[in-house]
Every structure is written in structure tokens, then in C-alpha cells.
Image (cartoon, rainbow, N blue to C red):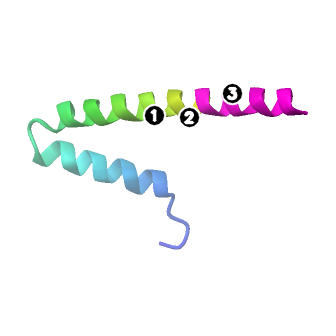
Amino acid sequence: MENVNPYTLFLILILLILSTQPNSSKELEKISQVLSVMQESSSQLKKGMAKIQSILQ
């Protein structure tokens, strides 16, 4: 197990969760939506900080 890809382990964990809990797909959808919003927010924050930095130079 020296060269195990962490993404593979994550996918195995997700599959195990899906197989044991009947409503887990709804929970995973909520998590996916939260992560998507967080990604968009951080992207906007980076763009804003870059713009501020360019103005100050």
C-alpha cells in the first residue's frame, strides 16, 4: 500500500457510504453543492484580491 492514490481511497469510502445508507445520495448532493459554492466563493475572492493588488501597484 505504498503507492495508493488518495483519490482512490476517497472513492472507495464514498461507495461504501452509498451502499450502507439509503439516503446518502441526498447527503452527498448537499455536500457537492456546498463544495461548489465554496469553490466559486474562493475563486471570486482570489480575483478580488488580485484586482486590489494590481490597483495598489
Q: In the drawing, what numbered circle is on residue 42?
A: 2
Q: Quadrant of residue 32?
A: top left
**Which residue in the protein does label 1 denote?**
38
Residue 24 to residue 2: above or below:
above
Q: Residues within 10 Å of mark 1 (few under 14, many from 20)?
A: few
Q: Residues within 10 Å of mark 2 (few under 14, many from 20)?
A: few
Magenta-colored span: 44-57
Image point (55%, 67%), residue name: 3
Q: Could you tell me the amino acid type at mark 1?
A: Met
Residue 38 to residue 9: above or below:
above
Q: In the drawing, what numbered circle is on residue 47?
A: 3
12 left or right of 39? left
Q: Outermost residue toward the bottom? A: 2
Q: Residues within 10 Å of mark 3 (few under 14, many from 20)?
A: few
Q: Could you tell me the amino acid type at mark 3?
A: Lys
Q: Are marks 1 and 3 in contact (CB under 8 Å)?
A: no
Q: Are marks 2 and 1 in contact (CB under 8 Å)?
A: yes
